[in-house]
Amino acid sequence: MLYTLARPFLFALDPEEAHVLALRLADRARAAGLLRFAACPAEGTPVEAMGLQFPNPVGLAAGLDKNAAHVDALAQLGFGFIEVGTVTPRPQPGNPKPRMFRIPEARALINRLGFNNVGLDDFLRNVERISWRGILGVNIGKNFDTPIERAADDYAIGLERVYRHAAYVTINISSPNTQGLRALQEKEQLDALLGRLAALRERLADTHGRRVPLVLKIAPDLDETQIREIADALRRHRFDGVIATNTSIARDAVREYPEAREQGGLSGAPIFDASTRVLGMLASQLAGEVPIIGAGGILCGADARRKRTAGASLVQLYTGLIYQGPRLVGECVKALV
């Protein structure tokens, strides 16, 4: 109810300004004990995946809380897990504004934020202040000015720094908003990157006495050969999970809207089918060996069920929350019971 009242005001603002304001309001509502009136949490069925016990299968996707600054408020919305980031080794402002665009008629967003974040030092200080003790995933990336041939260095720094704080770590190589990043999904570069991170994870597991799951986040704009190569690499390097998918560079589903001319990643309802297609092909290739987190275009409980039918063990929300509000979390939890 609270979000229904607030949405027209938020949608009158620039999308990025509305995003920042909504997170601040959530923090204040939590402090005042009012957030429970905005949320509609539901009793979920626990899910075991990646060696972790999730209280319910509905999570928050990375990108909404890039700096891990609002986790305690977001946790009250009923998520079974929360993923923060993407964080890069050094702080960076991201791409020039404006860099977020709504397409309300299509229930979609286009963003070209570009991994804007406070960097690992401040990010980890925020993580250390979190009082919630649920499953926290940390999504790591490379700085925009790190050459692609040295990208693995940035991911190694990120993994080493966040390791002891994370329930799992996601390797984001699929954002379309960092130049050249998606090249890391190609066979040889992917194999080298995953191999290095897998070896580092084993050393960190010995040091910390805990084997933190590694997850790869992929794009929806992949063909069958690329999906097969990714599945092979996930198995070969003993990755624990894969997120299908990130945002899309395709515009076929929104070509009639002027915002479609904007560069960046498309998310929301228009990418549901493409994302679920990739999820299904990946599930067929993996045959249950690696759990899949389904993301991309979930705007109702039925969408969450379709992701599970396609092969997802868990799902994540982002753009759907902007259009549907916090009630979407409970709706999806109920749909997956």
Image (tube, rainbow, N blue to C red):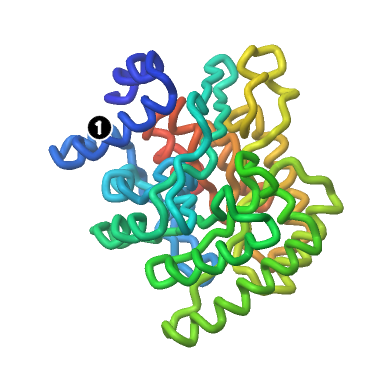
> Is 211 in front, or is 301?
211
Type of amino acid under label 1: Leu
**Farthest-out residue, left:** 32
Write down the quadrant of residue 147 in the picture: bottom right
Name the element at disc 1. Answer: helix
Q: Where is residue 255 in the image (x, y as percent from the top left)?
A: 71, 17
Q: Measuring 58% from the left and 44% from the top, which residue is drawn there? A: 295
Pointer 1 residue: 25
- Give the vertical position of 329 relative to 281 (above or below): above
Q: Where is residue 298 in the image (x, y as percent from the top left)?
A: 56, 36
Q: Measuring 73% from the left and 46% from the top, which residue is drawn there? A: 278
Q: Give the left or right position of residue 226, taking residue 330 as reference.
A: right
Q: Measuring 51% from the left and 67% from the top, which residue is drawn there? A: 157
Q: Where is residue 240 in the image (x, y as percent from the top left)?
A: 60, 68
Write down the quadrant of residue 77 in the picture: top left
Q: Give the left or right position of residue 193, taking residue 14 as reference.
A: right
Image quarter (top left, top right, bottom left or bottom right) of the N terminus: top left
Q: Give the left or right position of residue 149, taking residue 86 as reference.
A: right
- Give the vertical position of 41 relative to 251 (above or below): below
Residue 59 seen by the camera: yes
